[in-house]
Image (cartoon, grey):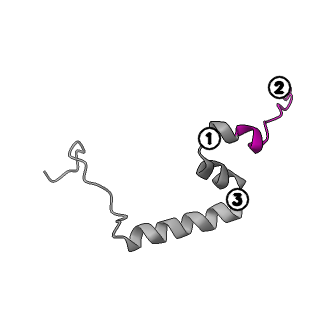
């Protein structure tokens, strides 16, 4: 079994503030459970606005009727 490389400390989110969009940092500050719930709400909104889960037609597919 190869040796495990040493852990590299990551910079604190506060240090990254000037580098990233504030909305991105807000997303990463959420816990995994909070991100899951928020993603679910985003899908609900997408569908409510008329979005579709149907795949887009692919004219390059050998199964395309066109």
Q: Give the farthest residue toward the front.
A: 18
Q: Is residue 48 above or below residue 35?
A: below
Q: Nearer the viewer, residue 52 or 48?
A: 48
Image coordinates for residue 42, horizontal then vertical, percent:
51, 65
Give me the residue at 79% from left, 41% from top: 12
Give me the residue at 23% from left, 50% from top: 63
CA neighbours of label 1 inside 10 A, class few (<14), some (14 to 19), many (20+): few
- Find numbered disc 2 in the image and state the secondary structure of the residue it sits on: loop
Q: Is residue 58 above or below residue 53?
A: above
Residue under label 2: 2
Residue under label 1: 20
Image coordinates for residue 21, horizontal then vertical, percent:
59, 45
Of tags 3 and 2, the one toward the viewer is 3
- Find numbered disc 3 in the image and state the secondary structure of the residue it sits on: helix
Residue under label 3: 32
CA neighbours of label 2 inside 10 A, class few (<14), some (14 to 19), many (20+): few
Mark 2 and mark 1 residues within 8 Å of each other at the beta carbon? no
What is the magenta segment's predominant secondary structure?
loop
Q: Which residues are magenta?
A: 1-16
Residue 53 is drawn in which quadrant?
Answer: bottom left
Image coordinates for residue 23, horizontal then vertical, percent:
59, 52
Gap in angstroms between the C-alphas marked 1 and 3:
20 Å
Q: Judge whether residue 8 is colored magenta.
A: yes
Image coordinates for residue 8, horizontal then vertical, percent:
82, 31
Query: Does residue 21 appear left or right of residue 7 in this picture?
Result: left
Quadrant where the image shows the N terminus: top right
Pointer 1 or 3: first along the chain: 1
Gap in angstroms between the C-alphas marked 2 and 1:
35 Å
- Find numbered disc 1 in the image and state the secondary structure of the residue it sits on: loop
Pointer 3 or 2: first along the chain: 2
């Amino acid at each position: 079994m190869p040796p495990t490389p040493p852990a590299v400390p990551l910079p604190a989110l506060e240090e990254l503030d000037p580098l990233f969009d504030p909305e991105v940092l807000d997303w990463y500050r959420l816990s995994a459970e909070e991100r899951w719930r928020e993603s679910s709400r985003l899908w609900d909104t997408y569908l409510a606005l008329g979005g579709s889960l149907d795949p887009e037609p692919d004219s390059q597919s050998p199964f395309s009727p066109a």
